[in-house]
Structures are given as C-alpha cells and as structure tokens.
Image: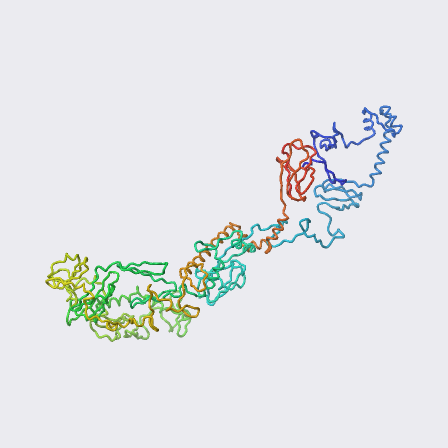
Amino acid sequence: MQFLTNIDLSKNELQNARIQNLATAPANPVAGQIYFNSTDKKFYGYNGTGWVDLGQVLTGDSIISLLNTSASKIDDDNLSANVNDAISKRHSHANKAVLDAIEAAYTAAEKNKLAGLPEIKQGLEADRPAATGSGMVYFATDTKKIWKDTAPNTWTQMGGQDTIDWSAVTGKPSTFTPPIASATQLGGIKVGANLTILPDGTLNANDNPASFIRKQERFTVAPGQNVFNLTQGTYKPGTNAVTWFLDGIKQDDRAMIELSPTSIQIDGLPEGADVMFEYYEVINWHPFPNHANEHLTGGADPIPLATPTSDGLMPKDALAKLNGISPGAEPNQNAFSNVKVGATTIAADSKTDTLELVAGANISLTPDAANDKVTIAVTGVAQNAFPNIKVGATTVSADSPTDTLELVAGSNVILTPDATNDKITISANVPVSSVNGKTGAVSLTASDVGAETPSGAQAKVDAHAADSVKHITDTERNAWNNKLDASEVVTSPTPNKVLKLDANGKLPASITGNADGNAATATKLQTSRTISLTGDATGSTSFDGSANASIAVTLANTGVTAGTYPKVTVDSKGRVTAGQALSPSDIPNLDWSKITSGKPTTLAGYGITDGVQNTGGAPSIQAGADASKPTAGVAGRLYVATDTKKIYRDNGTSWDVIGTINWADIVGKPSTLSGYGITDAIPASQKGAANGVASLDGGAKVPASQLPSASTSAPGIVQLVDSTSSTSTTQAPTANAVKTAYDRAVSAENNAKSYTDTKIANLVNSAPSTLDTLQELANALGNDPNFATTIMNQLALRTKKYVATIGDGTTTTFTITHNLNTQDVVVTVRENASPYNVVFADVQITDNNNIKVLFATAPSSNQYRVVVVG
C-alpha cells in the first residue's frame, strides 16, 4: 500500500511501527528516506547525497576518528577549551583521555535520564525472559499479547489480542443503548418486516416486490363433512386469495366461509363430491392488491373497459345491471318448456335445452336471428305421395299436402314401423295354423319347435353335475366333510374322541387287550351299519365291511307326468318340474331374413285381403311421364304421372284419373265447424272476445293491447332489448343480450385470469422454492405491511458510487466531480493496473459534488483510479 502524500499524525504516537527491511539500499532514494539493512543489521538514512548509519554508537575513539577525518571546524564558542584545543590539534590521540571523560560523563547523564523508562522488548512468547520485577514490557509477536514484568517470576498481561479479562475491568457500564440511526447520524436500527440479519451481520432484504405461490388441494367430501383443512400451505383470509371448484366446475366464492388461513367451511356438499381449492400462498402480500389496482381505470397499466365490440374489464355500471338480475332468473322468461306437435309433446330437458327444427323433404327453414323468427316454406310437392289411398271400396283422401295417413293395427295384426328403412312390417298375430309344415291335429316333437329332447335336456342336467362346473368337486367336498377338528383327536382313550395313531401307524402301546378304538386293520365291522339316502333321492342298505353293498335309489317324484313335452321347466338341481305345450309367446320374433323356407308367395297366403295384387306378373304400381303410361288392360294397377302429378287406375280397359279431385267439385260441403265434426277449433265469434282467443294483427302476432304487462309479481309481456349497454328500467334483455353480457363477463374473467396468471408466472419467474410464494416473501421481509416505505427509507440511506481515472504525468492536484450531492463520502485511490494496490493521497472535500485528490509527485498517465462512495 502506497501513501502518495505526507502523513500528519498531529503529534500522535506511531506505535508498534516497523520501517522497511531491505538487504540492499533502495534505488532512487530521496532526502530523508530511511530503511533497515537486514544484512548488516543497521538503520540508514539518506541525506541527499548518501546513506548515513543512523544507529551508530559513538565511542571516544569513533568520535575522534570522525573529528580527525572531518574537513570542517566546529564553530561553537560554547565548546570547552579542551575541545577547541583538540580541534586545533587535529584531534590527535593525545586527547583520548579527555574524550573518554566526555563519553563517560555523557553516558552517565543519559542513563540518569532514561532510568525511569521501562525496557521494551519483542519476540516469541516462548522466548520471554524470566520475570524479575524489572518493569520490562514484552511484545509477543506470535500470540499478539503485551506482557509486563511486575514481580519476580510474574508476567502480567497488559493487553493485546486476548485483551484483559473482563472481570478485571472496573467501572464497566451494565447496558449500552446506541443512538437511533438517522440520515445524518450513525446509530442502531431495528430489523423490520421482510428483513433478515445473517450470522456475519449482513442485513438482507427481499428484492422481489410481490411473490406468491398458487397452490391447489383436492378433497373428496366425506359424510357430513363441511370443513376442509388445508395441509399444503396457507393463504390470507378476506383477500380473495382462494377460490373453489366442485367436480371441476368453478363455484361462487360467496358460498365459502373462511375460518382461518388453513380452514374453509362449505355447507350442503354431497357425499363423494370432488372439491378443489385454489389459493395463493402469499410471501409478500402488501404490494399484491396494489398491483391489481394498476390495471384499473386511472392506474399505471389500465386494462380497457369492455364494450359491445371489444373485450375488457367489466365497468361498474354493467356489474350493477347484472347485480340487478334476481338470483335464479331465467335467460328468457317467456320460453316454452314444452312444444306439442300433434299428439307428441317435446319437453325441454334443461333450462338451456335447444329445440332443433330440421327441414324435411321439400321443406326449407330460414332463420332470422335479428327478428327472432324462423320461416318454414314448402319447396315443392312430394313427388311420390298419394293424395288418395283406396282400401277396398273406400278411398282415403289427404286433407292437405302435409296430411298424415295413420295405420292402425286391428285384431290379430301387428304393425312394426322401421323409420330407418322407410317401411312398415304388417304381421298377422293369429293362432298357429302350422308348425314346421305340420297342420291340423298333429303331435309335435322337440325338433319341430327347436326344443331339447328329454335325453338332450337330461344331458345338459348331467353336464351341470360334473366336477368341472361345480363350485367345489365331490372330492373336495368329501375332503372337507371328512376333516376333523384338532380338538377331536386325542392320544389316550377318551369317550367320543378319535385316538391318534403313533409314528408307525399303530395304536399307542398303552392300548392293550380289548381296545376301545379304531383297529389299524379289520375285515368286518363289529356292528353292521345302515347307510341311508335322504332328500331328493332315498334308499338304504346294511354295511358291515365284509363285502360291497349297493343301494337301490328312488328319486323323489317332481309331479310331472311321464311323457314328451315341447317345453319343460328345470329346477336348480337339474330336475324337470313341469312340462307344457308351446304358446305363440314361446316363438321368438325373427327377422324376415331368418325365415328361409315356407314363406307364402301370395297375399292370400298371408291372409291379406285388402292389398293390390300383381296381375300376370306386371308391377301393381308404376311411375313415369304421363305420356308413357302402358296400355290399359290390367285391372287394379296404379300409375303415377311424375310430370302432371296425376294418379291413374287401370279399370281393365282404360285409365281412370283418381288423384285430381278439386275442392270445388265436392258438393254438400258443411259451412260450420260442427258440420265437419270439428271439436278442437274455436269459432270466429270468440276472436278477441272475453274468455276467448286473441286476435292476431297484420303481422300474425297478438297485439300488445290484448296482453298484460309483466311485473315483479305477475307474468306478462315486456319489450325486449338486444343491447348490452341499455340503461332502460322497463325493458328486459333478450337471451342473446344476456348471453352476450355473460360471454363478455366470462371472457373478461378469463382474460383477467389469463392476464393475472401470466403476470403471476412472470412475477414468480422461476424464483427459488423458498421465495416463490407471497407468504415466504412476507416471512423473508419480516411481515412488514409498510415494507415499501421501509425500503424507501432504507434506499434513501443507501450509498452511491462514482469512479474516475486520473494521472497525466504533470498534474499533482485533481478535481473529481462526483455529483453525489453529499459531503459524507468515502474516497479510495488504487492503482489502475495489477495488482491494483490501494494507495494514499490527500483528499479535500470541497463541496457536496466535488473533491480534490492531491499527490506529492504527479502520477503517470491514467496511473490511478479514484472511487467515491456516498
């Protein structure tokens, strides 16, 4: 470290100092420079021309030698006559006795002066001399301790690195209260919220203004559960930092009761439902709501308000309108929950169900969303529709182009409609006249009706008795039945117990004579036993073990008379418990394609008497151009002219037009509803009358004068408005307007959520896991709600830095303009090249923005770098 200017110690001591040690004299010395020569162990000083030994001890001989070699006379009138005589005599050795006397007098005088000063020495602590009470002060260079020889064999530590024992210090203060730090005074500070002090005294502050972690926890609702305790983190209640989802659908947060930072109550949840809570665990909460305020109107980063043509935040007046809609209000109060088409009523499955109108053949649907209507138009006439259907002698005419002909099943007739293939299957439901080609009073076999023969049925019964299809085999059953409980086996004779054989399979040796037990081998039982069968099979036999025995088994009578039955009933044991003849319901409905033989080929074969028959193999109904009709001659056949829309019937000799009857040609038509037998229409006299029907205006609508006005207590009409920005208090929004407002609200919510999620993600920005939630940041910042103010106050105290490079080879005084606006600065001067040693120069603080750096010798170009911190 270099000092580039003079050091004024202001008459203070330079303690424990050591001058430069060199083996040879330094180069380019200046007058007054000193050093210690480590080779000859001498102190030298430079006098401007040469090095002088500053530690030389002058004896009488050395003084005489110096005087004899000196070219100058000592000009001092106060010298003694002896000295002047010696000088005049060129300091010959004849004066040695005089000089020795002077040396002795000088030494004694000096010793008298120094007698009161203690001796000072330094060295290793182990090399400290024995204490004698001399008062010597000893500096231990290795342990950095200061010792004093206070008594024989007693060294007392006076200071140094280990310092004096605290108990030896008197007058110590019991407490120390530092002054409170301020902008102009050093002092103590308190560690506020969101600040930490490390073990080394470093004060740390969280540099993230707002941090939090979004967390999710799922619960399955237990019976009667309404309180949910969070286990993965905490949130701050009452700050809209938690929301909830039921079965994956976001719910109204007002249903929650926030009990604590980790406990939430929701009543009325169904058992087994999936509930998820999404919450923000806050590290530094205070700036978070302020961040949201930045995006409101007038904030630093406002989000535009939503308009009818653009998304944005919902304005407060729009929210007020939505709040004005009663809970449970329907999108369209006048919507029909049921639509009746003929005899069919189509009911809405939900409040938002949609009725779809589908255009059939020759029908066009034109929706008009602006006017809320659908125009249904006929695009043509059904090309192949029959205006008249003749059944026998009766002709059934269509009353309108869209009239419907209904087929009604009579007795013993089944109608099977097939809408997919546009056909109706007409089946006769009559007693069976033949089975498998057999007619009359016949005996049916099982194969005639596809039933099992008795032997086949018995085979299936037997199949169910096999071990492979039982739950357990007979072997397993017998094994289980034959197992004995361990308590039933004994090793000594015990009544009603089983005697255990020994290791050789013999009775125990303790059994002698007539043993009451089981023999190891025997040819016959002592007493014959009767083996009986009971239940569905009975029989018995006597068995003594001397020979095989057989049992004549008698099966229980199930009550079925012996015989052959096309249909039988089998119980769970495989027994036939009933037999019956087949009934029509026993024959399954078969697809026509499944019947491969015996099908009739004529109408009569099916018993149909009112069908149009083919004659001579010619088709019964043909279609084509009117001019292309075949020659008449096949009575009963029909021809549809596709160009003239006429329907002809062949009478055997000519074609009769049967499909062009005009209404005007019909005579005797009634003139009243009752004349037609119409009972479900209203007479014109009731049009617009009380308790009658409303009369329609020119637009086919009911005039407003005939409809009541809607109110909060009664239904009625109200004018709809399709605008989402209407301020009317008497008009109601259309479903479209409500949906538009809802969509915009949802879009605004989603946009706000997306925007917030993005901002939150950007805010977290891969922060470490210990500092990526607002709670963790809050803890790190000491939970200081005024952290911003605290930080600003701290920032007001922070230091700034200014750096400049100086040196031009001629200038010794440099003015540095730092613009730090304070005189409380610290100035450091260092070399501008490696090893970048710090040097010392005079520094003058001239004002709040300028300092002067002064050097004794002008530094070279860019030699030094000045750092100003303040």
**Image location (x, y in percent) of residue 66:** 81, 27
97 lies left or right of 314: right
- Give the number of marks: 0
Nearer-the-camera pick, 427 or 462: 427
Please say which color scheme the image uses.
Answer: rainbow
698 lies left or right of 202: left
Nearer-the-camera pick, 327 or 264: 327
**Image location (x, y in percent) of residue 267:** 48, 66
Nearer-the-camera pick, 588 or 7: 7
- Specify the quadrant of the image occupied by residue 497: bottom left
Residue 37 visible somewhere in the drawing: yes
Asked if residue 74 is positioned above or below residue 653 in the image, the reply reads above
- Toward the right, the furthest residue is 81
- Specify the quadrant of the image occupied by residue 835: top right
Placement of the N terminus among the 4 image quadrants: top right
Residue 471 visible somewhere in the drawing: no
Who's the residue at 58% across and 55% down the image?
Answer: 779
Placement of the C terminus among the 4 image quadrants: top right
457 lies left or right of 222: left
**Image location (x, y in percent) of residue 219:** 47, 61
**Image location (x, y in percent) of residue 44:** 74, 31
Nearer-the-camera pick, 136 or 117: 117
